[in-house]
Image (tube, rainbow, N blue to C red):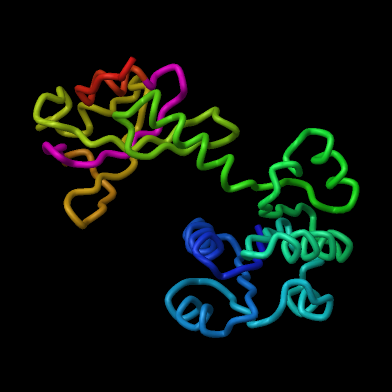
Amino acid sequence: MKIIIAGAGAVGTHLAKLLSREHHDITLMDESPEKLEDLSANFDIMTLPLSPSSVAALKEAEVGDADLFIGVTPDEAHNMTACMLASKLGAKKTVARVDNYEYTTSENRDFFRTVGIDSIIYPEMLAGQEILHNIKRSWIRQWWEVQNGALILLAVKVRQNARILDQPLRVLCGPESPYHIVAVKRGDETVIPHGADCLRANDIVYFMTTPKYINYIRDLAGKEDYP
């Protein structure tokens, strides 16, 4: 996919790095050359030190060929303007980060679609959802939903009592297992594990599973929910 991201702050930079690893064609726009300086050298990302709310700049970024345009600058108005312009210039889908909760209502979302903003991101709502998950399942370090929640990626720290320790992953993750271990963080190092690798106490393990098996993962890791 050709993806254009407007805003090289923490959110935009993280998105650009993440999506570039998945071999998407990424362009990152920001008015500050300093924010873009190291990114193109260290990641497969095209950078443009231009304003995303400029028609000329968007044309230079070839926004008309974009499958997705994401506006995540700190300025809500710039994000919305950039998305509307990008849509008019031919971007297939647009996403804008906003600070106004009012914009997230169903009625307003429908309105924004009519002017070229397909999706709204409200950071406080996302943070609230993450807090809710942490309250309900305090044993989960991190939680990501994939494909609208059809798949869940969990990060869990395993302790000495976990029954999945000291067993080869080819035994733990057989063809019939309802989960897959996609990565392990051990100290400061994150590794992609192989079949002969074993988990150790205090590893942070990244499980991919479906919602119905979350409690199964909890039991494997020797964890308990708070009531």
Q: Nearer the viewer, residue 189 or 181?
A: 189
State whether residue 179 is above or below residue 206.
Answer: above
Q: Is residue 83 left or right of residue 205?
A: right
Q: Is residue 94 left or right of residue 36?
A: right
Q: Nearer the viewer, residue 49 or 126?
A: 126
- Please report the residue visible at 62 percent of the width from the left and 64 percent of the height from the top: 74
Quadrant containing the C terminus in the rendered view: top left
State whether residue 226 is above or below residue 52.
Answer: above
- Please report the residue visible at 60 percent of the width from the left and 33 percent of the height from the top: 148
Q: Is residue 105 left or right of residue 174?
A: right
Residue 47: give x, y in percent of width and height. 59, 78
Assess whether residue 5 is covered by the magenta stretch.
Answer: no
State whether residue 194 is above or below residue 32.
Answer: above
- Please report the residue visible at 50 percent of the width from the left and 71 percent of the height from the top: 44
Residue 193: give x, y in percent of width and height. 25, 45
- Please report the residue visible at 65 percent of the width from the left and 47 percent of the height from the top: 121
State the image quarter where residue 222 is shown: top left
Quadrant containing the N terminus in the rendered view: bottom right
Residue 179: give x, y in percent of width and height. 36, 27
State the image quarter where residue 73 is shown: bottom right
Residue 104: give x, y in percent of width and height. 72, 40
State the image quarter where residue 167 is shown: top left
State whether residue 203 is above or below residue 214.
Answer: below
Q: Which residues are magenta?
A: 198-214
Number of marks in picture: 0
